[in-house]
Image (tube, rainbow, N blue to C red):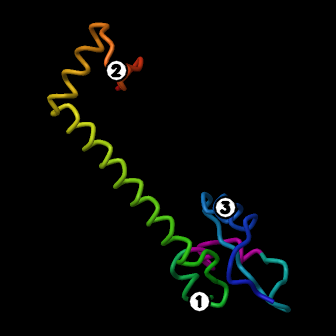
Amino acid sequence: MYSKVLTRCQDHWAEFLSEFHFTITYRPGRQATLPNALAHRDEVYPQRGVDFIRKNPQNFHQIIKQDGIQESRFFSIKVEIFSHLVDNIQKEVWQEKDYKEILKQLEQGESVPDYSLEPQARL
């Protein structure tokens, strides 16, 4: 039985192992023999790259499905938009006349109802 969705543990290992450059090859039955001396020499029988993939397409299977990758990209886009929103709000706040007056009063030690000044000069 094959699962189309990775478990949490499988997802963790897939993410961890994606940091390394290696090839997992599956050789069913009789093909799963010990490698010989020629199999270790890249110049005789290349074991990585496009040539190897063309010669052995049955050995390559997609581990991480496209669905998981799309969710990650969508999440990063949301974060980027949110950070731009915060930057824009901070720029616009300094343009506000009321904000400048309240900040000036708080810096002089006066009390302003519903406002306080934090250590980093934030209202």
> Which residue does the numbered mark 1 point to in the structure image?
55
Q: Please, what is the three-letter code of the amino acid marked with disc 3? A: Leu
Q: Position of residue 97 (x, y in %)?
A: 14, 29
> Which residue does the numbered mark 2 point to in the structure image?
121
Q: Residue at x 45, y 65 (%)?
A: 73
Q: Position of residue 39 (x, y in %)?
A: 71, 77
Q: Residue at x 71, y 79 (%)?
A: 25
The stretch in magenta equals 37-48
Rate crowding at label 2 as few (under 14), some (14 to 19) or many (20 or more) other CA atoms within 10 Å: few
> Which residue does the numbered mark 3 point to in the structure image?
17
Say if 4 sits above or below 121 in the image. Answer: below
Q: Position of residue 101 (x, y in %)?
A: 19, 21
- Looking at the picture, tell me which residue is in the foreground, 47 or 78: 78
Q: Name the secondary structure under disc 1.
A: helix
Q: Name the secondary structure under disc 3.
A: helix
Q: Please, what is the three-letter code of the amino acid marked with disc 2? A: Ala
- The residue most toward the front is 113
Q: Residue at x 22, y 15 (%)?
A: 104
Q: Main secondary structure of the magenta part?
A: loop
Q: CA distance from mark 1 to mark 2?
A: 65 Å
| Residue 99 figure quarter | top left
In primary-sequence order, the first of circles 3 and 1 is 3
| Residue 93 figure quarter | top left
